[in-house]
Image (cartoon, rainbow, N blue to C red):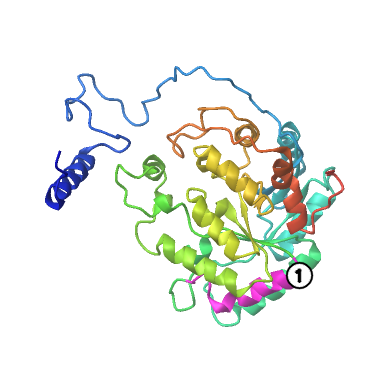
Amino acid sequence: MKRPGLGAAATVLAMTAFIAAQQAPGQIRPRPAQGREPELNPPTIREYKPRSMLVAPQHLVPRAKFPVIDIHSHQPTPISTDEFGRVIKGMEDNNLRILVNLSGGSGDRLRQGLDAIRKSSYKDRMVLFANVNFRERIGPGFGAKAAMQLANDIKAGAVGLKVFKDLGMFATRADGTRLHVDDPELDPIWETCGQQNVPVLIHVGEPQAFFDPLDYTNERWLELALYPDRRHQEGVRFEELITERNTMIKRHPRTRYILAHFGWHANDLARAGKLLDANPNVYFDVAAVLYDFGRQPRAAHDFFLKYQDRILFGKDSYQPDEYPYYWRVFETNDEYFDYYRDYHAFWKLYGMGLPDPVLRKMYYQNALKIVPGISPAAFTN
């Protein structure tokens, strides 16, 4: 048989591309009678909840295997006695030993928050990160002034700095232009953290899908339809924010940065690995991106093994009944189970089956190493 010439091969490739373009996302090849409409009324995206017929072993994990430091939580500051008691109940149920409250504020509010913890019955169960107020317009001298206040907050008892997503997305300079994450005006803040030996837990940007077109190929379409404030189809772009963040990190190698939400690279582990390889001062927390680990359990397992010294546990939203999903993904090899928020993930989760030494590092050892202000007294190896 004669081999097809270049013209024939090109025709075959063009036809293949054309057929692929006609297929719905997720289809490998066209269905018979492609284009046929369903005879029954189709459900809406929120109504379609198919019940899986798969019968697979289940190993529910209501409580973490080892004590946990949650590096990413938000609580009232100062916290009331009643509210602290409610929080502690959820911590005990999940084996959370210490909660890092990233909403510590600054100045008087921070001191009030620290006093409330110290005077409570649970003074060894919560620590505070300080914050810098980026909501005012940023002019010359802002960075030096903020750095001085931060040094005082650390002296008062704050064990780190939390930077919210306002920086880069909403904060502005005095002239009304967007304040870039890597603006040199902010250098004194990052340098102060390095000098004071406290980490910066920083949230830059949002998931990349939040910036993508709002069409039916966007895997976060429902979430964006439900929450208008999460749409970022105009203004600063995802890659701009990431570039600015990475430039800032490079400029301050003595400062430890914990990138909230895996730096929004949990969906691209190769990119996440390159970032860690290039920057020994960078760490990730796993807060609110469980859906990405659970849909690629083998790749995630290998990544967590390779970078086991660079990953910290964090949850973000404090919902005690949601933590067991994390324990199950990290600790078991279970297959095809639900995530707890369908607008985050239209797919099932799978367990990563991480070994005990890796779990210990992620759950508490790395936090103890990176945040010197957390007492190791309640933890054993």
Magenta: main secondary structure equals helix
- Report the side of 21 relative to 214 (left or right): left
Q: Which residue is mark 1?
A: 196
Residue 40, picture quadrant: top left
Q: Quick one: label 1, few (<14), some, or many (20+) residues within 10 Å? A: some
Indicate whether residue 253 is drawn in magenta: no
Query: From where the camera sits, is residue 226 visible?
Result: yes
Q: What percent of the width, then of the height, locates residue 252?
A: 63, 73
Q: What percent of the width, then of the height, locates residue 6?
A: 15, 52
Label 1 element class: helix
Q: Residue at x 60, y 33 (%)?
A: 325
- Report the side of 72 relative to 119 (left or right): left
Q: Quadrant of the C terminus?
A: top right
Outermost residue, front direction? 1
Q: Residue at x 30, y 35 (%)?
A: 28
What's the magenta region?
Answer: 179-197
Residue type at the position of mark 1 = Gln
Indicate whether residue 196 is drawn in magenta: yes
Residue 319, picture quadrant: top right
